[in-house]
Image (spheres, helix red, strand yellow):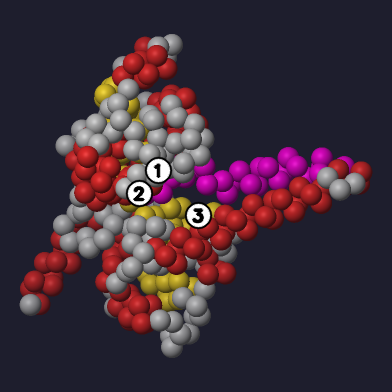
Amino acid sequence: MTNIALDIMGGDFAPDCNIQGAYDALNADKDIRLLLVGPAAVIKDKTSDWPEELKSRIEIVEADEIIECDESPVSAVRHKKNSTITVGANIVKEGRAGAFISAGSSGAVLAAGQLIVGRLPGVKRPPLASMIPTAKGFSLFLDLGANVDAKAEWLCQFARMGSIYMEKVQHKARPSVKLVNLGVEEEKGNALTKEANAMLSQIPEINYEGFIESRDVIMGEADVIVADAFTGNAILKTMEGTLGFVMQVLKSVLKSGLLTKLAALMIMKPLKLKLKEFSASEQGGAMLLGLNGLVMKCHGNASRKDIANGILKSAGFIREDVCGLIREAFAKENSQNNTVE
């Protein structure tokens, strides 16, 4: 069985949405076992009418505290020992599950990942990574929020971890890697990008192809896109806002007259099908890579589908032993560095 811990109380639509997502994931994959973290009475009530086969693949883990979004993440993780996020992270630390998923406080989830689950040996900083929709399908974008101030060495490690994930979980042979910059010419960029570019060019384990401008991120010009968290988060939020704006304009135009309304009837079905292909809900959430287990952060307004897909994606991560592969890669690197020294 692939064991995954799920925060039942995290997110805007908890606990119902999370319970429903868990139900769908268990139905979709018979080899998944879920540790549902939250108030036992609530979980028992919400799962009371589940088929016995599904009930046999869940374990209820009591946690009666919730970390709110306005609390100090580090302080809350340290002091709220029985919060769903703290308990869920400890389940991974103890080896009872290979992944922990939460739609709760982003800061608390990231803090619990680093403070409780802990980094793999050799990993300097864990990046927050997410599959983003592009013109060519999906690309892995990292760092999206975990390390606002970065070093060139960290960006190189992000590239290696991202490459391992894309190759093993997304089955992309020798995935291409690019570094976000304000231009593609080598002389452009700040000190960080110039130094990282030089270092990335010397790593044979990755297929590094140089710089990528922010406008080309959504065009799918690379399989793995690397940036510091400040840049990555700004690009991601801009993409989300732009998409929302475009959809608003499209709806306004299609509702503006009789002819456009008729046109809307004709294109709505194929448009919805195309948009579904690029839906972020298919990916579940963002992953904190480089830890002794997977920590996945779902969006605060995560839907039933988001939760289900987050569980299914996490199962693939565990089965491909991405943590083990990252551990092995960095252990080899450290060994080589010690030999040189």
Residue of label 1? 69
Q: Amino acid at mark 3?
A: Ile
| Residue ID at (43%, 11%) | 49
The C terminus lies in which quarter of the figure?
bottom left
Judge by depth and name the residue closer to the eye, 313 or 125. Answer: 125
Q: Secondary structure at mark 3?
A: strand
| Residue ID at (55%, 69%) | 216
Residue of label 3? 132
* Badge 3 or badge 2: first in the primary sequence: 2
Q: CA distance from mark 3 to mark 2?
A: 21 Å
Q: How many marks?
A: 3
Label 1 with label 2: CB-CB less than 8 Å: yes
| Residue ID at (40%, 14%) | 45
Q: Secondary structure at mark 1?
A: loop
Residue lying furthest bottom: 187
Range covered by the magenta-colored residues = 262-287
Question: What's the magenta bit mostly, secondary-structure-wise?
Answer: helix
Residue 274 lies, with reference to residue 306, above or below; the image says: below
Q: Amino acid at mark 2?
A: Gly
Residue of label 2? 107
- Quadrant of res 52: top left
